[in-house]
Amino acid sequence: MQAKLQRLVNISRAATLLSYFGLILLLTAWYLLISPPPTANPYVIWAVQTVPLALFYPVVIRKNLRGHIWLCFFLSIYFMHAVQTAMAGGPNSLLALAQSLLVASLFTAAMMFTRWQSKLNKLLSAAKAE
């Protein structure tokens, strides 16, 4: 049981890291390279989009379970923005679709990491108590 949980934790951790850094990379490419806004400063828009997400970097790197849960709550803002932009049908709808898929992937991976790591911690602490 412990080996299976450890494998699930490792998979969900890898998916969380891949989705997290993929989302930051997508937002950077979108607002600075692919389709910078013509009427606004692209660096300000990029900062507004990426800095709040980058604040969760220590949480993701240190494997903080409570922080992962807060990240999942925070991702709802990014998901709403991505779906709204994708459904508007503008020139950025494919980028917004990719963003919504990355956000959904990050949400799922972070939530499953939290669940499985919590179960593994309980299993390890019960084994130490015996």
Image (cartoon, rainbow, N blue to C red):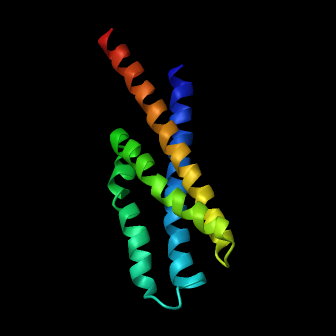
Image quadrant in which the N terminus is located: top right
Nearer the observer, 119 or 84: 84
Q: Does 46 sit above or below residue 14? A: below
Residue 92: x, y in percent?
A: 64, 75
Nearer the observer, 114 or 94: 94
Q: Quadrant of residue 34?
A: bottom right
Q: How many numbered marks does the figure carry?
A: 0
Question: In this image, 126 relative to 117: left or right?
Answer: left
Residue sitting at 48 percent across and 31 percent down?
116
Residue sitting at 64 percent across and 63 percent down?
98
Residue 94: x, y in percent?
A: 68, 70
Q: Residue furthest bottom?
A: 39
Nearer the observer, 74 or 25: 74
Q: Does 9 sit above or below residue 109? A: above
Residue sitting at 51 percent across and 49 percent down?
16
Residue sitting at 58 percent across and 64 percent down?
84
Nearer the observer, 55 or 6: 55
Question: In this image, 48 relative to 24: left or right?
Answer: left
Q: Quadrant of residue 29?
A: bottom right
Residue 113: x, y in percent?
A: 48, 38
Q: Residue furthest top?
A: 130
Residue 85: x, y in percent?
A: 60, 68
Q: Residue furthest left?
A: 129
Image quadrant in which the C terminus is located: top left
Question: In this image, 103 relative to 121: left or right?
Answer: right
Question: In this image, 81 relative to 98: left or right?
Answer: left
